[in-house]
Amino acid sequence: MLSCLLVLGMADSAQAQKKSGKKSKKSKKAAVVETPTQELPYNSNDCLFAIPLQQDVVYGPTSAPKGAGRLMEIQASANNQNVVECEHNSVWYKFVVPYNGELEIEINQTNPADDYDFMVFKYTDVYFSNNMIQGKIRPVASSLTAVDSSLVPAKKDLKGKAAAKPAAQAVREAPAQQQPSANAKTAKAKKSTKPNYILGMKHTASSYFLTKDTVARDIKSLRVAQGEVYYILLDNLSPNGSGHSIKVSLYVDSFRPLVSFSDPTSKKPIAVDLVILEKNTNNRALVKNPSFHSDRLSFVPGFDYTLYAKLPGYFTVYKEFNSNIFKTDTMLAITMNKASKGSTFTLENLYFTDDGKQLLGNSDTVLMEYVMLFMNHPEVTFLIKGYVSTYGDVTMESDQEVSLERALTVKNFLISKGIAADRMTVAGMTPNEIRRAGTAANDPKIGLLKKRIEFIVTGIGK
């Protein structure tokens, strides 16, 4: 109660988050690379100035939260046992839900001796802050537990055996001399290059509320909907405490295909500079890795994605796709073609009118991948070669004409998207190609020609 009275007495004063300012000393034996401390913004200990969080992006490690801010939004309530008795050293965060799922939170403490609690509130309206102060808004989930009891020696019973006292009770009731000193905390924090996972919200947990007497790490994740807004109050009861990091995520029943890249010549896997953007959430970066080998990635069902893959000496891959392709495919295997003369790109899934003069179906989307490829490589000139399914000499003249029209149709499409006409030449099938394709059409083991268009690199400029 004394700590609460002290905080209440300071509630009207403008308490800014204090800057630590000091840097950890480097070891003489080996240089230690530490993650820079992120200073908590001024007044972020009031919900009006809550720090916005991005999905799957870690915020922190931060400086230590100091004080309760200008306003004491949270106070003890006899009608609600799921809130802290008052704000001690707090910081507010805000998260706008990008799509339906289950909200998950991971909080890592720089110093495990700190006693962090957190509460989650669903935003209501513009009077949210006032209603919070008046106690009209209750948390939808909260963790008041103290799970960091490993630093506190257990008391012994009369027989000399360690007593099985609840961890939360042990931490909150431990004598002051048993708690690490402020200097000890600072020293430990300096040695650590990564905050320690302490508490959070997970879909595998079973309860939305943890009290002071519980020892579980996690509360149960909340089912949330696109557009909803949630506020998170993180409060450190420990005086002279340290900072933390926090990450929010959404758990969904996702597709998890294996994404890999390979060289078609060596047929070996290669590492690429990969970016995958989630179009349904304003191009959130699902992946941003300059050296991606292969991994299983999580895609939200029904979402649209854009993929960029780059590697020096290879053509850039641009691909747009919907995640529902993974209903049947458990792998996204992409070949990276070397940027050299003679490199060939074969397209089978293009559709034309009978005369070859118009594109049909989803052909525009298919061709856009190659628009981006050639846009990213303005030094490349190439031949567009058209093909048709044929029965040989019987349809020789018309097949030649239609195959050439298909090439011209694709060229005109690329010009309309900004590819310079002088970079492209066109060609249809030759008489010999038509005869060979006609022979294959009469062979049940081979059948009709499937390819519609080929892009063949004719030159690589500077």
Image: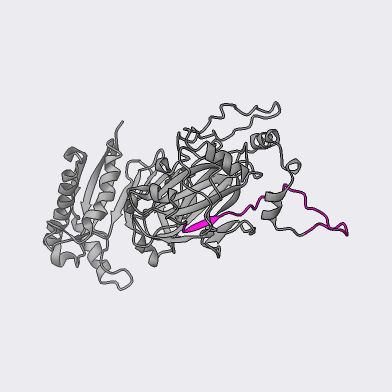
Q: From this viewpoint, is residue 264 visible?
A: no
| Way the structure is coloured | one colour
Question: Is 6 placed above or below 331 here?
Answer: above
> In the depicted view, which residue is nearer to us: 80 or 363?
80
* Residue 374 occupies quadrant: top left
> In the depicted view, which residue is nearer to us: 28 or 350?
28
The overriding secondary structure of the stretch rendered in magenta is loop
Magenta-colored stretch includes residue 308:
no
Residue 207: image x %, image y %? 55, 64
> In the depicted view, which residue is nearer to us: 460 or 30?
30
* Residue 2 occupies quadrant: top right
Left or right: 347, with 261 as reference point: left
> In the depicted view, which residue is nearer to us: 449 or 91?
91
Q: Residue at x 17, y 44 (%)?
A: 415
Q: Quadrant of the C terminus?
A: top left
Question: Is 34 placed above or below 72 here?
Answer: above
Residue 168: image x %, image y %? 66, 54
Question: Is 8 placed above or below 331 here?
Answer: above
Magenta-colored stretch includes residue 142:
yes
Residue 72: image x %, image y %? 48, 43
Q: From this viewpoint, is residue 393 visible?
A: yes
Question: Is 397 placed above or below 376 here?
Answer: below
Query: Which region of the structure is painted magenta?
Result: 139-163
Left or right: 263, with 219 as reference point: left
Residue at the extreme bottom of the image, as rendered:
444
Number of callouts in the render? 0
Left or right: 296, with 409 as reference point: right
Residue 332: image x %, image y %? 41, 57
